[in-house]
Image (cartoon, coloured by chain):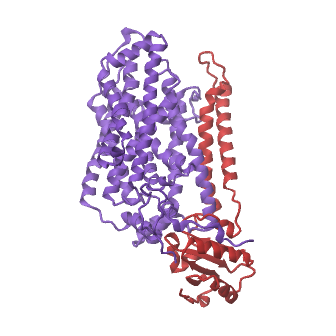
Amino acid sequence: MSIRATDFSECGPVYGLMAEFDSAQELVTAAHKTHEEGYRKIDAYSPFPIEGLAEAIGFHKNRVSLVVLIGGLIGGLSAYALQYWVAVITYPVNIGGRPYHSWPSFIIVTFELTILFGGISSAIGMIALNGLPLPYHPVFNVPEFTKATENKFFLVVESSDPQYDSARTRSFLNGLSPRMIAEVPS
Amino acid sequence: MATNTQIPVADRRVPVIAPGHTFSTITEKIANIVLTRPVSLGWILGFLIVFGMLNMLAGVLGYLFLKGVGIWGINIPVGWGFAIINFVWWIGIGHAGTLISAILALLRQTWRNSINRFAEAMTLFAVMCAGTFPLAHMGRPWLFYWMFPYPNTMRYWPNFRSPLVWDVFAVSTYFTISLVFWFVGLIPDFATMRDRAEKPFVRGIFGLLAMGWRGSARHWHRYETAYLLLAGLATPLVLSVHTVVSFDFAVGIVPGWHTTIFPPYFVAGAIYSGFAMVLCLAIPIRAIYGLKDFITERHLEISAKVMLATGLIVAYGYGMEAFMGWYSGNQFDSFLLWNRLHGPYKFSYAALLACNIFIPQVLWLKKFRVSTGWLWLISFVVLVGMWLERFIIIVVSLSRDFVNSSWGMYYPTKWDWMTFGGTIGLFLTGMWLFLRVLPSISIFEMRTLLPEAEVHEAAEVKQ
């Protein structure tokens, strides 16, 4: 374990402190301990989804499913309303004496548009709730962070956390035995 | 530091990922195909061939738009011909991609992680090829937007009771959702490519596509929810698409079309031909790009079993069609059966039974399921068989319907064949480029297959 004391303090404001770990297990343990210590403005970064990591930093519920529900309902209802309006009100055509409001025929398009709107809202909802696209983020200032999309695991305590104190937080993170600690310039 | 990279193999089956891999080696191996592997002469030669075929498509479509659909072999009574045969065939091939990416994700079949990306790409290109045919068949393809409901000066609206309108919605939704699903799956891998790329231009492109993805735990949480919901939405969608395609036939009264077995039989046939195409592509790709560690014998064997199972469902469909021809006592239905067995197209029916039912039965033997050469050959035979199935459904039924005076033979012209060959060129050009510009295996999902990716509950700190 090597500790690299990078000091960016003269470069301007600091976004937070970043600790690097070697394994998913170490990151989850560290995240739990940091959250338990009372830090709330924390985030963990990993190259693949890790079960329980979001919960460890105190993030339990996301609203993606609500967005999808709303999107799907809008899709289905508007598809049915459109078909009803076309077939019954604005362009009624007598086809083989079938009723204008022949609802079994309308099921397919209603179904397809429910899926279409639900699916698109799940992608757009996820991207928007994640605050993406985001061209710049301070964590990318740390050179080691390129490994966050390959094989390394990172924990960041942000300086906006009320408990944040450059020296105390650093020594706390040090106690989690990370591979290195770096200050993240903002 | 976790150095233990041995994968515990609980059973004696071939693992889904070869032992000895780490997060880094997986990333390197897949990303380097795009980032550092030099363009080989073989790739260029192959590309010239498939790109030439794509240009042939452009040429024949140009000639078609100039002259009209009369250059094809279609006539009255066989108005659908090659265009609809190929449409149904291509759409069916696409189905395996969505099955692998969505249904197998819901069923937690983790072996799918190494084939879902390129199977989804295959879906997209197959649906593009499929879409070409109804568009070209329209006669006036530049008016394609008349199919969609939009306020227009003609004060005209589509008839929502028609299966052909359902088809427009089913196929366009299918393409859009497949594209969205594929793109969402690619976002974390775009970030990996961005962080590995050496050239600023390449880094810029992947950076734009990654949209600033940084692997935050909060982002992954939402990402997994979105991915799961997309899989949940795509699952009924994939089953519905070929169902709706089968309604194009089943709602009509032509003998051989007007049957309730069509939806399940079409969906099974779609998955059958789709897995055949997956194998036809995966076997050469894993050999050429050195991906045998990720697409292992296990994947080939499972795909072969899926083919065997869906092939049996298709065989049941054929059996039921023949049975109903006899059991219904309807003279037109029994004539259809006679016509298939003894009519002018009897050779295509014999070939269909051989390709789709008899030859694939060798997959019961493990020897054929693990031999890449045999498996490739059988998959190719299945692709031919499934094409013949659509030929028989469309041409044999339409050429001889209720009244003898309206009978007529159908012969495809060279333009029919060139259009079909051209879409094969479109499909292969897409795959050719995809393999070189995007990670063809989902890198982040492969990482989750390693034992190091697992986090044990016991290590959690008690609250």
**Residue at screen point 67% across, 52% down:** A65
In the figure, B282 relative to B207: above or below?
Answer: above
Residue B261 appears left or right of B434: right
Residue B224 picture location, percent across and down? 60, 58
Q: Quadrant of residue B387?
A: top left
In the rendered structure, the colour chosen for chain B is: purple
In which quadrant will I find the C terminus of chain A? bottom right
In the rendered structure, the colour chosen for chain A is: red
Q: Quadrant of residue B17?
A: bottom left
Asked whether the viewer can see residue B437, the reply is yes
In the figure, A7 relative to B103: above or below?
Answer: below
Residue B145 appears left or right of B357: right
**Residue at screen point 31% across, 21% down:** B346
Residue A21 picture location, percent across and down? 56, 77
**Residue at screen point 37% across, 35% down:** B361
Residue nearer the viewer, B67 or A155: A155
